[in-house]
Image (cartoon, helix red, strand yellow):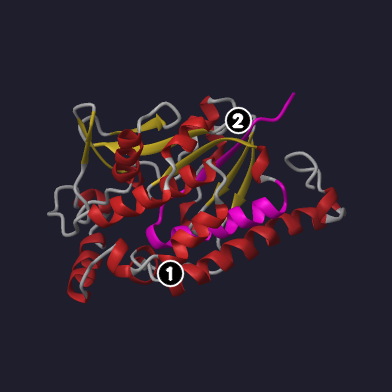
Amino acid sequence: MDSKIGLVLSGGGGKGAFEIGAWKALKRLGIDKKIQVISGNSIGSLNAVMFMVGELDLALKMWRNLSQKEALPLSATQLLGLYKQYKKGITNILEEDTIVDSSGYQEIIGSYVDFEKVRNSKIKGYISAYNMDDDIVDYFTVNDKSDEEIERLIKASSALPGLFDPIKINDKFYRDGCIKDNVPIDPLYKEGCNEIIIIYLGEDERVDLSKYPGVKFYEISPRVNLGGMLDGNLDFSGSGANKRILQGYLDTMAYFDKLAYEEGVPLNKLDIIGEIK
């Protein structure tokens, strides 16, 4: 049976720079060209559409040039208040007042995402978002969407309670998919992917994979904690991004190197997702 390869990018705010480092490793190993379907939640949705058009250098530039003020303009008092809110549990603060204008995030999306290339990508893309009205997660395809629709889907998938306003799509209100599903495997499984790479942004995110029989999973997660709410999820500093990009690259290379060692073959001969070039 031919392989159909999928890639899942989870959410985690500033920790998402790790996924760009992982992408860099996948590119070095030649695996990036084998991906046929991708899904992303929250910051993973932005990284996913960048992956769809294959612009790694632009993604690296985006993350390295981000500033806290641009991406998440919060005062120290607001950051502390948000941290206290999240200690209550995300499902308990769905109706909390919004404290950040999303125009900065919208400008980042508009500056770095080539919507036409997303539509023309050979990779099928999905973005997940939590449907507040129906209390479910919806998975949206992006290849068939307009510029504005893709932008709104990324914003909806990233609309954390207490941080950004919910986004209205087709008369429903949406928030960050992490409320129900931060690791959107379902659309890839329904697409028939039988090999799926998951990029986690924390060990505690691992999901029950027994729900997906017949699939070979490759689970990549940080070997060193990427930080907590304040120094991880809400950290969009250039220094933080650089550190996580490097960690994502090294951890992904180490993951596949370990698989090669276990099979007793050189890394370039590892029989995984086809032969690595």
- Give whichever of 159, 258 is nearer the camera: 159
Q: Residues within 10 Å of mark 1 (few under 14, many from 20)?
A: some
- Left or right: residue 268 compared with residue 125: right
Q: Is the Cβ of the residue at disc 2 closer than 8 Å to that at disc 1?
A: no
Percent across and percent down for residue 164 are 22, 52
Residue on which disc 1 sits: 227
- Left or right: residue 41 compared with residue 191: left
Q: Residue at x 64, y 65 (%)?
A: 250
Indicate the amino acid at tag 1: Gly
Q: Is residue 9 magenta?
A: yes
Residue 267 figure quarter: bottom right
Q: Residue at x 24, y 48 (%)?
A: 91
Distance CA(mark 2)–CA(mark 1) = 31 Å
Percent across and percent down for residue 56 are 56, 53
The answer to whether residue 223 of the structure is visible from this angle is no
Percent across and percent down for residue 109 are 36, 49
The answer to whether residue 8 of the structure is visible from this angle is yes
- Give whichever of 28, 132 is nearer the camera: 28
Indicate the amino acid at tag 2: Cys
Vertical position of residue 82 compared to residue 111: above or below: below
Is disc 2 placed on a helix, strand or loop? loop
Q: Residue at x 23, y 53 (%)?
A: 103
| Magenta region | 1-30
Percent across and percent down for residue 19 are 52, 55
Vertical position of residue 153 compared to residue 249: above or below: above
- Which circle marks residue 193 in the picture? 2
Vertical position of residue 160 compared to residue 2: above or below: below
Q: Residue at x 57, y 31 (%)?
A: 122
